[in-house]
Amino acid sequence: MYLILFGAPGVGKGTQAKILSSTLDLKHISTGDILRTEIASGSDFGIKAKALMDKGELVPDELIADVIRLAINDALNYNGFILDGFPRTVDQAKLLEKIVKELKIPAPALVILKGEDDIIVRRLSKRRQCANCGMIVNLSDLAHKEICPTCKAVDKFIVRKDDKEEVIINRLKVYRAETRPVVAYLEDKLKTFRIDALQPVAVVTQNIMQALK
């Protein structure tokens, strides 16, 4: 099974991708995870990517294409893959088509998670990162809002630059202008499912699974 999980920042793509990856034994290919790993390593790629992400802008295709290609090739050792955060432009979508053709794998299905911008802004503005272990959480999900659920550090939560409200709004503008056209390009080529992402996590997962059946 090959899936593209699509939607605006903050609709829960990462959460659903992790659940589906575990349930279906699919490789979770997260552009965000790849970028954060490169940023943490201090590589040239990571430094360039961080400067763009801090402003809420997209990382250019030429910086990420080779990394995605390697990840998709590795997914052949699994039951398939879930792409989370790629493609984000029509050019990336065309690149993905070439990769799929070169590797001779079935065309992926397109799963679109839907959510209104005002709710997305509220969600992301409550997101925090633990300065001690790096875990990303949402304050709305925590019983003890000052304690990291992973490492138990107290009062170590910080607001990432790309989770500040003005950056979130810019990220959504970038998504509407540059990323949404990808749907128009792909939906006539791929099996496409639209899922309400604002339901509880378990309900969203159930609806995705039911659609895929």
Image (tube, rainbow, N blue to C red):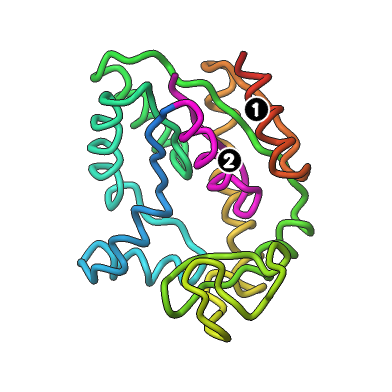
Magenta stretch?
1-24
Q: Is residue 27 left or right of residue 116?
A: left
Q: Nearer the viewer, residue 24 or 4?
A: 24
Q: Secondary structure at mark 1?
A: helix
What residue sits 63% from the left and 54% below the top?
A: 10
What residue sits 68% from the left and 69% below the top?
A: 139
Q: Is residue 2 magenta?
A: yes
For the residue marked with disc 2, what is the amino acid? Gln
Counting the numbered discs, the total is: 2
Q: Is residue 99 left or right of residue 87?
A: left
Which residue matches tag 1? 208
Q: Is residue 192 left or right of residue 78?
A: right
Q: Nearer the viewer, residue 101 or 21?
A: 21
Looking at the figure, which quarter contains the C terminus? top right
What residue sits 56% from the left and 67% below the top?
A: 149
What residue sits 40% from the left and 29% below the top?
A: 81
Which residue matches tag 2? 16
Q: Secondary structure at mark 2?
A: helix
Residue 61: where, in percent of width, then height? Answer: 34, 47
Looking at the figure, which quarter contains the N terminus? top left
**Residues at badges 2 and 1 in contact (C-beta under 8 Å)?**
yes
**Quarter holding residue 41:** bottom left
Q: Earlier in the sequence, mark 2 or mark 1?
A: 2
Residue 44: where, in percent of width, then height? Answer: 20, 67
- 210 to 145, vertically: above or below: above
